[in-house]
Image: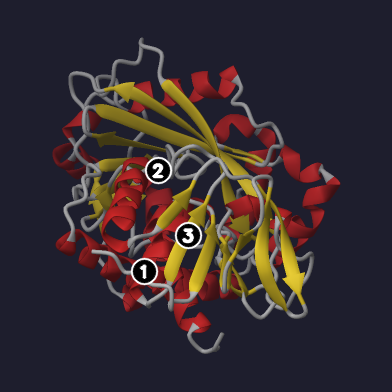
């Protein structure tokens, strides 16, 4: 079902990750002819490639919080506990760091968390529509989730924090150790201290990379979205107050509307400063994918003390963890070993841990307030949709829809 015609406005999206693809969907539905550019050979090969895979629409929150500051001394003392902030000492990250600290108040956390939940709820609505209308295979399930806590006091603190979310809908329950084991038998042989957990019955999971590739095929075949892969965009060609083309090593790509959805690489293409500009930093996360073992989990499980997540995606076990404020693009073996050991202690029989895992490190593009940057970017027809942090999979459709509504206020 082709949607394109010579009379349609031409939208150029830079970035074929989950954010760029969801933006393509929303714009083609709004009547645009869409072309997506990406420097990789396939869609979903950047930050979207091997993320945690959870779709958690009701119980997400901003990273900046009083709790983050309270935990900072322990973080500095033990960088292997899941967060390593040593990279923030680099001068290039100072501006982001200072702004982030201003977001670590209770008032700011509530404001930013509310904004994230609003985007997430819209995202869920659109994802449900897409899944109903199209048969896209991406290992989707709705098994629920458990967040384990090592002490009763930590469990109570977590429950207290989640009370704020109740006014926006969704469900969560504080459960005992025995209930954790009953809901998720893979935890019964755990070597971790578990006093209890937070159960999120509505949590969903799916393979984001698989979704990106299948969704791109759908966009191309049924909606005539053009994909130009292996294209290296490096600048903008401007005419007066408008952008006329994206400058690439393969030649200029012209259009009527331009959207930059390149995550932490947004600064390569966007003007240095414009109203609404936010600092974006790439927070690196590590992902290990093993073959499943004798007792793989059904639910998604996050160990709050170790700050890592374990979930089953088909016949694979995905283990993700660490927030590394680092300029090093390659994962160090010590982090691989640490994350493997944590997963083995949490669920000894969940995976074939003795095999060599698929190792991936992605850079989560994070704004100082954790809310994505969505809006006009210094020219009449230039927009940005970037900075979704670890929530791009959850926020993608909602952020794209909100930006599309903003674009619709202007005529081109």
Regarding mark 3 in the picture, which secondary structure is present there? strand
Across the whole image, how many numbered discs are drawn on residues? 3
User: Looking at the picture, how far across and down is residue 37, in whole percent?
Assistant: 53, 52
Residue at screen point 33% across, 54% down: 220
Q: Give the number of the mark in front: 2 or 3.
A: 3
Q: Earlier in the sequence, mark 2 or mark 1?
A: 1
Number of the label disc, if any, that sits on residue 4: 1
Element assignment for label 2: loop
Secondary structure of the residue carrying numbered label 1: loop
For the residues bearing labels 2 and 3, Cβ distance under 8 angstroms: no
Q: Which residue is mark 3?
A: 35
Q: Give the CA distance from mark 1 to mark 3.
A: 11 Å
Report the mark closest to the observer, 2 or 1: 1
Q: Which residue is mark 2?
A: 151
- Residue toward you, 327 or 196: 327
Q: Is residue 332 left or right of residue 142?
A: right
Q: Residues within 10 Å of mark 2 (few under 14, many from 20)?
A: some
In the picture, the quarter occupied by the C terminus is: bottom right
**Image location of residue 353, percent across then percent down:** 35, 15
In the picture, measured across the screen, residue 234 lies left or right of residue 196, that is: right
Position in image of residue 154 (x %, y %): 43, 50
Q: Residues within 10 Å of mark 3 (few under 14, many from 20)?
A: many
Identify the residue at image location x=16%, y=53%: 135
Q: Is residue 191 visible?
A: no
**Quarter containing the N terminus:** bottom left
Residue farthest along the front direction in this orientation: 6
Earlier-in-chain disc, 2 versus 3: 3
215 and 311: which is toward the camera: 215
Closer to the observer: label 1 or label 3? 1
């Amino acid at each position: 079902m082709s949607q394109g015609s010579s009379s349609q406005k031409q939208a150029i999206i830079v970035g074929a990750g989950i954010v760029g693809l969801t933006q393509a969907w929303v714009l083609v539905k709004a009547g645009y002819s869409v072309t997506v550019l990406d420097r990789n050979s396939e869609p979903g090969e950047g930050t979207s490639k091997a993320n945690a895979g959870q779709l958690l629409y009701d119980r997400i929150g901003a990273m900046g919080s009083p709790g983050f500051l309270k935990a900072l001394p322990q973080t500095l003392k033990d960088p292997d506990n899941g967060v390593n902030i040593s990279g923030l000492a680099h001068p290039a990250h100072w501006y982001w760091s200072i702004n982030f600290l201003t977001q670590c108040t209770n008032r700011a956390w509530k404001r930013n968390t509310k904004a994230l939940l609003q985007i997430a709820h819209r995202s869920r609505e659109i994802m449900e529509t897409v899944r109903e209308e199209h048969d896209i295979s991406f290992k989707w399930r709705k098994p629920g989730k458990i967040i384990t806590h090592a002490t009763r006091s930590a469990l109570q603190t977590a429950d207290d924090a989640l009370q704020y979310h109740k006014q926006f809908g969704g469900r969560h329950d504080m459960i005992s150790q025995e209930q954790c084991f009953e809901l998720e038998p893979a935890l019964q042989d755990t070597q971790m201290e578990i006093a209890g957990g937070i159960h999120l019955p509505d949590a969903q999971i799916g393979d984001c990379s698989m979704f990106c590739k299948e969704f791109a095929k759908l966009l191309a075949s049924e909606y005539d979205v053009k994909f130009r892969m292996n294209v290296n965009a490096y600048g903008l060609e401007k005419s007066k107050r408008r952008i006329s083309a994206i400058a690439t090593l393969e030649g200029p790509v012209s259009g009527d509307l331009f959207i930059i959805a390149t995550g932490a690489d947004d600064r390569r293409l966007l003007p240095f400063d414009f109203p609404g500009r936010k600092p974006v930093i790439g927070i690196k996360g590590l992902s290990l994918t093993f073959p499943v073992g004798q007792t793989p989990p059904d639910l998604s499980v996050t160990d709050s003390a170790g700050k890592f997540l374990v979930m089953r995606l088909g016949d694979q076990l995905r283990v993700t963890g660490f927030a590394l404020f680092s300029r090093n693009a390659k994962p160090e073996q010590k982090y691989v070993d640490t994350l493997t050991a944590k997963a083995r202690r949490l669920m000894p029989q969940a995976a074939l841990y003795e095999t060599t895992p698929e190792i991936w490190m992605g850079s989560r593009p994070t704004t100082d307030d954790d809310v994505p940057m969505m809006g006009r970017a210094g020219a009449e027809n230039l927009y940005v949709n970037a900075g979704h942090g670890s929530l791009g999979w959850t926020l993608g459709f909602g952020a794209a829809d909100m930006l599309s509504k903003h674009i619709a206020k202007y005529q081109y």
